[in-house]
Image (cartoon, grey):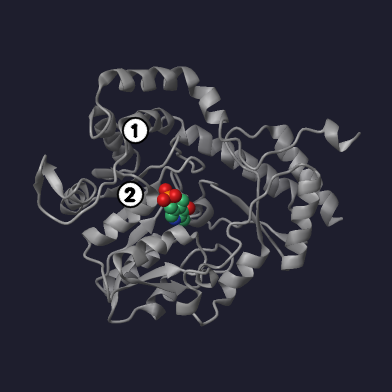
């Protein structure tokens, strides 16, 4: 058989969710467009209430992006110049930049080398008198151990803000991510996330009514009442069209995460004997939302060799993320010290295709290509 006869496997089919839900989505979009109300209306209120309920938290405040959700939360907590915020060394730069935007300094801590998330001990060692908040990331959909992190935070009277951009529906000891024990959790609705809009969006869930109220001010010109401005603030809102679409997709989140899990299970079974790769591990207390399925090679050369083999077979892959955040151009001069775990991961990780609409045949094909490569 020639390569051309075998269908390519995209890294992620972003149009498939629309194809599955187009009747409902078309109806909702048309309803919003006909309503004449495009911002801060009933669709947003309905989505916020529904997402708060899904996360088992009393309050949800949506924003224009996940980055804004993080930044506004930090601002609402009073984080600013001179402050330090503890972050993972290994994450998307979107965890760090909102901290820098407040004027505070991201303080990187190396992740646990098998789960790729922060631990309580790692965080505790990095706390200084300037630390103002702890920002763990549930990377690739695997939760950080918030119970351990909250215990450290409580000892030092520091707030924990979760970067849950990759963890809609992940669970920690049976509890859905966002439900606590943090002060707040920030989500992204970027199209490729487990709960994705058709554009940008984000949200914060919290149990703190005052924090929620401050967030509502900060996202809307510092205003509760039109033309009455109480604080310096910005404009960062989730529009009515995106809110209506996200409300529909929220009802599919559990089912779509289960389909992601099925892809992950197929990979884990099919690739169990491939000793050229380390497969993702799941802690016994965790349920991953499988935002990404990330394998680790022994070296950069080996990882790049696998990329070449998969690409030649028509399989799309992405490296999350190819440059450690402290080594990226914006940060490198301010972070001269090495972070060896983050640097090794940038060299060695590779994300295989995964998504709720990935056919079993595609997953099986990826398994075959990887096994052939490893032979
Ligand atoms: C996507 C993402 C962000 C940023 O969210 P946006 O909606 O793209 O602004 C932040 N942190 C992590 C870990 C992410 O994956």
The residue where tag 1 is placed is 243
Query: Element at badge 1?
Result: helix
How packed is label 1: few (under 14 Cα within 10 Å), some, or many (20 or more)?
many
Q: Is residue 12 toward the left or the right of residue 257 in the image?
A: right
Q: Which mark is residue 152?
A: none
Residue 273 appears in the figure: no
Q: Residue at x 50, y 62 (%)?
A: 91
Q: Is residue 107 above or below residue 11?
A: below
From this viewpoint, is residue 320 visible? yes
Residue at horizontal 65 percent and vertical 44 percent from the top: 353
Q: Quadrant of residue 74?
A: bottom left
Left/right of residue 95 with respect to residue 256 in the rendered view:
left
Q: Residue at x 63, y 45 (%)?
A: 264
Looking at the image, residue 233 lies above or below residue 8: below
Task: Give percent across and percent down for residue 319.
Answer: 63, 56
Give the label, 2 or 1, closer to the camera.
Answer: 1
Q: CA distance from mark 2 to mark 1?
A: 21 Å
Tell how many labels: 2
Residue highlighted by disc 2? 179
Image position, residue 325 (x, y; %): 51, 67
Query: Residue 19 location in percent, x, y?
Result: 55, 24
Foreground: 80 or 91? 80
The reply to whether callout 2 and callout 1 are in contact (CB within 8 Å) is no
| Percent position of residue 115, x then y | 55, 62
Q: Nearer the viewer, residue 167 or 44?
A: 44
Q: Is residue 235 above or below residue 345?
A: above
Q: Which quarter of the figure is the N terminus placed in?
A: top right
Q: Quadrant of the C terminus?
A: bottom right
Label 2, secondary structure: give it. Answer: loop
Quadrant in the rendering for residue 259 = top right
Chain-order first, disc 2 or disc 1: 2
């Amino acid at each position: 058989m020639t390569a051309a006869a075998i269908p390519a496997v995209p890294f992620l089919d972003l149009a498939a969710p629309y194809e599955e839900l187009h009747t409902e989505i078309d109806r909702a979009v048309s309803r919003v467009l006909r309503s004449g109300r495009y911002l801060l209306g009933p669709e947003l209120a309905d989505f916020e209430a529904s997402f708060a309920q899904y996360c088992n938290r009393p309050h949800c405040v949506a924003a224009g992006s996940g980055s804004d959700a993080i930044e506004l939360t930090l601002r609402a907590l009073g984080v600013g110049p001179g402050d330090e915020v503890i972050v993972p060394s290994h994450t998307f730069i979107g965890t760090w930049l909102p901290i820098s935007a407040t004027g505070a300094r991201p303080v990187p801590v190396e992740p646990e080398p098998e789960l790729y998330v922060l631990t309580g001990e790692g965080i505790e060692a990095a706390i200084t008198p300037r630390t103002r908040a702890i920002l763990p990331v549930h990377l690739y959909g695997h939760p950080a151990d918030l119970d351990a992190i909250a215990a450290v935070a409580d000892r030092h009277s520091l707030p924990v803000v979760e970067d849950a951009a990759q963890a809609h529906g992940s669970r920690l000891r049976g509890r859905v991510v966002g439900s606590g024990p943090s002060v707040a959790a920030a989500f992204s609705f970027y199209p490729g996330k487990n709960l994705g809009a058709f554009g940008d969006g984000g949200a914060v869930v919290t149990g703190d009514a005052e924090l929620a109220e401050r967030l509502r001010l900060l996202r809307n010109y510092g205003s509760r009442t039109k033309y009455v401005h109480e604080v310096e603030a910005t404009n960062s809102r989730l529009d009515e069209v995106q809110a209506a679409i996200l409300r529909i997709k929220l009802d599919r989140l559990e089912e779509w995460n289960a389909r992601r899990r099925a892809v992950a299970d197929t990979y884990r079974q099919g690739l169990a004997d491939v000793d050229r790769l380390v497969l993702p591990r799941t802690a016994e207390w965790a349920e991953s939302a499988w935002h990404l399925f990330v394998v680790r090679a022994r070296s950069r050369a080996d990882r790049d060799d696998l990329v070449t083999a998969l690409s030649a077979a028509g399989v799309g892959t992405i490296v999350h993320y190819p440059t450690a955040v402290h080594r990226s151009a914006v940060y490198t001069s301010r972070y001269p010290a090495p972070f060896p775990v983050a640097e090794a991961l940038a060299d060695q990780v590779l994300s295989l295709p995964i998504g709720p609409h990935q056919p079993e045949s595609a997953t099986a094909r990826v398994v075959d290509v990887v096994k052939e490569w490893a032979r």
